[in-house]
Amino acid sequence: MPDIRIVTEVAGRICALPVEPGASVGGGDDIIFVEAMKMEIPVASPAAGTLKSLLVAIDDVVAEGQVVAILET
C-alpha cells in the first residue's frame, strides 16, 4: 500500500490533533488544525486509509507546504 504525504496549505501553529496515529480516516476527514490569522484551518486527509504517523505536535510552527502527516492507503 502506498504512503501519502499530507501537507498543510497555510503557515501557522498546530492547535489541535484530533486523530491519533493508527486510526482509520476517511477522505476529507480533518486530521490537524493549524491556527493562522486567528482562525483554525483544518488539514484534511486526501484519501481514506490509516494515519501512519504525525510529524508535528501541538504548538509546533509549520510552513506552507510542509509535510505534517503520513497516510497509508
Image (cartoon, rainbow, N blue to C red):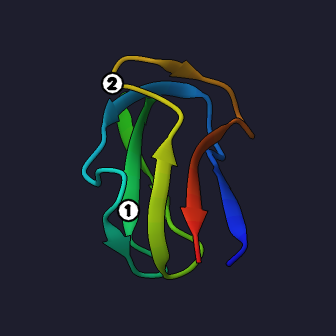
Tell me residue 27's x, y (percent).
49, 81
Q: Does residue 36 appear left or right of residue 68 in this picture?
A: left
Which quarter of the rendering shows the N terminus?
Answer: bottom right
Q: Residues within 10 Å of mark 2 (few under 14, many from 20)?
A: few
Measured as percent of width and height from the top left, residue 48 is found at 49, 82
Q: Is residue 1 left or right of residue 71?
A: right
32 up-or-down from 64: above or below: below
Can residue 37 be seen here? The reply is no
For the point 33% across and 24% down, the residue is 58
In the rendered image, which quarter is residue 26 located in?
Answer: bottom left
Say which mark, if any, is on residue 41: none
Between 41 and 54, the one nearer to me in the picture = 54
Q: Amino acid at mark 1?
A: Asp
Q: Identify the residue at horizontal 45%, vertical 61% (top origin).
A: 51
- Disc assigned to residue 58: 2
Give the residue pinned by disc 1. Answer: 30
Name the residue type under label 2.
Answer: Ile
